[in-house]
Amino acid sequence: VHGNAPGSGNDVLLILQAWLLQAWIPKYAEQALNMQCWFLCCLVLYWALFKGVFQIINGMKSTNVLICLVVIVWLPWFVIFVPLFSGNDVEWYEDHHFGHFETTVDTAVVFLKFHPLTFLHVFLMGMLLSRLRTLLGEEEDTERLGTIEGVFEALAPVGYLCLGMMFCFGACRPPAAKLSARLSVLLPFQGAILLGLAGLPGRPTKLAKWVSCLNFLESYSYAVYVIQFVCWHMWPSYQTGPLFFVFLAACATVLVHLVQKPAEALLKRSSKWALLIMPVSVMVLLPVLNHLLPHKNPHGTGLPASAKLDSSDIFAKKVDTFRFTLFDIRLPLEEAKSEFDTTGESVLINP
C-alpha cells in the first residue's frame, strides 16, 4: 500500500476503491490503498465515453479537428494564466502537503491532480490525433503525401528532443511545471511523439520500425507504474540505485503474469454480469480485512502517538504543591529533501 492503510473509519473509501471511484472525491484521492490506481478511475470514465465520442470525432472534417486540437493544447495553460493575471503566485500549489485536506488550496490541488474530469482533454486529444492521422492518410496528391510522410518521420525525434531538454534544463521548463506538466501543458510534444510513432495508416515511420522490438514492454508499463511506490516502501534504504529498478521490474513482471494476464483472460471468458463478482468481492473483503488486521504504526516506532504521564505521585513526596501532568507527544517530523541540497548534509533540528 502507499503509506498507511486507511483507518477503520474509512470503510467508505475502501468501498469506493473497489468500484474505482476514489478519485472522484478529492478528500479520498490521496488516502487510498496504492493511490497510483487513481488513473484507473479516469480510464473507467473514458471507456464509458469512448463509443459516443468516437462517433462524433469519426465524422469530423480536418478543419474541425485542427480547431479542437488547438483549443485542447491551450487548455492546460489556464493553470498558469489564471494565477498570473490575477496577481497570485503561479506555484500556489506548493502550499498543499500530501495527504492533507484542510484548506481550499488542498481541495483545488487534489482535484486538479487526480480528478478524471481534469484529464478528459488528454483522452479527447488522443482520439483527435487518430482522426487527423486518418484524414492525412487519405491525401491523394502524391507529392503532398510524400511531404506529410517526411514530417511524420521527424515528429517523434523532435518531440523526444524537446521533452528531454525540458527535463534536463530548468530554463526550458514551463512555469509551474509540477502542476502544469501534469495537466499536459506539454501536449504538443507528446502528441508529436504519438503521431511520429503511429505514422500514416499503412505507412509506419522508420523510428517505429526500429523500436518495434520493444513493443512487448507495453504489457509491463502500467504494472511498473502501479507497483513503484510499493516496491520503494519495501526497499531497505531511502536512497535507490540500479538494483532497485531491477527489483521493480521483477515485481512488475510477476504481477503481470500472476494478476494482469489471468484477469485479461477471465475478462474475455466471462459475461458482463459475472464480472460484477470481482468488485463486489473486493468491496466486502477490504473493509473486513481493515477491521481484522492490526494497523501499522504510521511512523515506524513502537511509541504511542501521545502519552500522558501523571507524575503527581512522584513529586508529591518532595513538594506537596508541585503537582502537574506531563504530555509526551511524538511529532511526525521528517527531514525535508530539498532540491537545492547538493551536499546531502541536511539536518533536522528537534524543536
Image: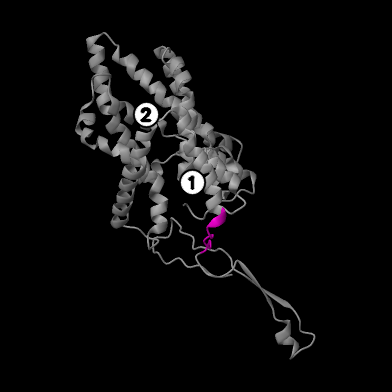
**In the image, is residue 314 above or below residue 245?**
below
- Residue highlighted by disc 1: 35
Frontmost residue, 307 versus 173? 307
Identify the residue shown where x is 57% and y is 34%. 82
Q: Earlier in the sequence, mark 2 or mark 1?
A: 1
Identify the residue shown where x is 60% and y is 39%. 87
In the shown orientation, is residue 124 left or right of residue 23? left
Frontmost residue, 262 versus 307? 262
**In the image, is residue 28 above or below residue 268?**
below
Q: Where are the magenta residues, as a range?
A: 291-299
Q: Residue furthest bottom?
A: 318
| Label 1, residues with CA under 10 Å away: few <14, some 14-19, many ≥20 | many
Identify the residue shown where x is 56% and y is 39%. 111
Amino acid marked by disc 1: Met
- Residue highlighted by disc 2: 191
Tag 2's secondary structure? Answer: helix
